[in-house]
Image (cartoon, helix red, strand yellow):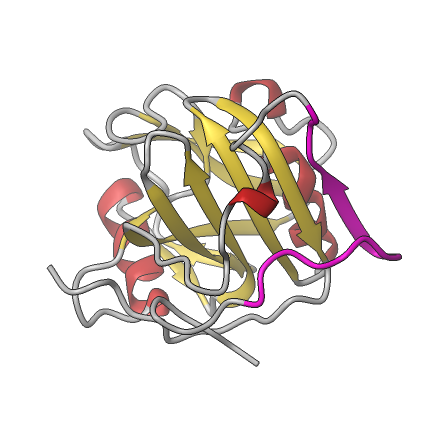
Amino acid sequence: MSWGPGDHDPGPPSPRRGTILAVPHDHVLRRLPDIDWTTWTPTDVATLVFVVRDGHVLLIRKKRGLGAGKINGPGGRLDPDETPLACAVREMQEELLATPVDPQPAGELSFQFVDGYGIHVHVFRAPDCLGTPTETPEATPLWARLDAIPYAEMWADDALWLPWLIEGRRFRGWFVFDGDRMLAHALTDDGPVSARARAPAP
């Protein structure tokens, strides 16, 4: 069943086949079980969209905001009363002056930072885009070969689920971060994927 902010998230799955689970033992109060995911509500809701075509994926080097300097997919925070799909299209248009073609939900990711910030991300995949991706004050576009994705310059979690997006597998992930450092994660390939969760009220 799909869920969104304010709904009850069942939380990370128990370890089983098809699930990646990692909880370092040396981080007291920084583990997935330390968070009540059934009542967890993110500070922000956001989107990412990845255009995958001709053996390449469209990425950006983010110039400002959360993750500035890192490589990621185009995306950003939902406006109030905006759907994730509308946000994914708008953010790509704003960041790259291009429009994703037929973006489809690929997965959902929940991030809790130890400083108290939390963000829930709807991830989309598109087979193409309209217009030429162009550098803006927000981002610099780059096409990466699927066999040469620059994971070393991306958030640590990307290397876990982006290969699944490329393979066409849906996913659901939960993560705990301390700044740029990933402390714990759980990832499953058959979690719920929803398309209409809305941003928290301002």
The residue depicted at 48 percent of the width and 36 percent of the height is 59
Q: Name the foreground residue: 148 vs 79.
A: 79
Q: Is most of the magenta stretch helix, strand or loop?
A: loop
Q: Is residue 56 left or right of residue 109?
A: right
| Relative image position of residue 177 (x, y in whole percent) | 48, 30
Residue 132 placement: quadrant: top left
The residue depicted at 50 percent of the width and 58 percent of the height is 37
Q: Name the foreground residue: 40 vs 106.
A: 40
Pick the quarter of the image with the C terminus.
bottom left
| In the image, farthest residue toward the bottom | 1
Residue range in magenta is: 10-25
The residue depicted at 65 percent of the width and 20 percent of the height is 26
| Relative image position of residue 94 (x, y in whole percent) | 22, 47
Residue 89 vs 192, above or below: the answer is above
| Relative image position of residue 19 (x, y in whole percent) | 79, 53
The residue depicted at 29 percent of the width and 67 percent of the height is 86
Residue 193 placement: quadrant: bottom right
Q: Is residue 157 left or right of residue 42?
A: right
